[in-house]
Image (cartoon, helix red, strand yellow):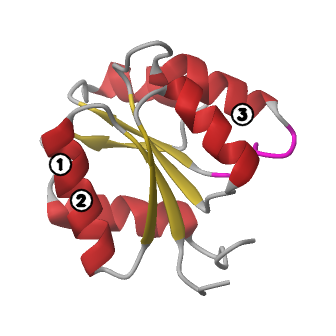
Amino acid sequence: MTGKIKVLLVEDNYMNKVLVREILTINKYEVIEARNGIEALGVLARDRPDLILMDMHLPEMDGITATRIIKSNEAYRDIPVLAITAAVSKSDEEELLGKGFDGFISKPVEFKDLLESISTALRGKKPGA
């Protein structure tokens, strides 16, 4: 156990992945990655993260479907899942929360917003808990 917060980043866009990974790494998060919802489910089975950052538009299995599967599984239900999306109107936010997401991060990703959203989602959680 490293004592670091482990974040699963599910993103297929290379530049978005590099940006978010760098922000998280600089801030001492451990980052594991998946390119789509199917890979994300496989990672969960091997390497339980403390938080999931889930892009909405992914190949093979989109973020909404993957999140629905994650939240329907008792073993993973308590892991916060934050949507990463360009759609951020009030109705979009309510729709995402209604689909099982615990919050969202707007694209383009802003350093401060990303860290605040993660901090809020993890409030009171200990690494690996």
Q: Secondary structure at mark 2?
A: helix
Mark 2 vs mark 1, foreground winner is 1
Left or right: 17, with 124 as reference point: left
Residue tagged by mark 3?
A: 71
In the rendered image of this protein, does residue 16 appear above or below residue 98? below
Label 3: which secondary element: helix
Label drawn at residue 27: none
Query: In the rendered view, would you say 58 is above or below 35?
Result: above
Q: Are marks 2 and 3 in contact (CB under 8 Å)?
A: no
Residue at label 2? 113
Q: Quadrant of the N terminus?
A: bottom right
Distance, label 2 to label 3, CA atoms, is 24 Å
Name the residue type under label 1.
Answer: Val
**Main SS type for the magenta part?**
loop
- Per the image, label 1 sits on a secondary structure element best described as loop
Give yes or no for residue 78 being in the magenta stretch: yes
Q: Residue at x 37, y 59 (%)?
A: 117
Residue under label 1: 109
Q: Position of residue 51 (x, y in %)?
A: 55, 56
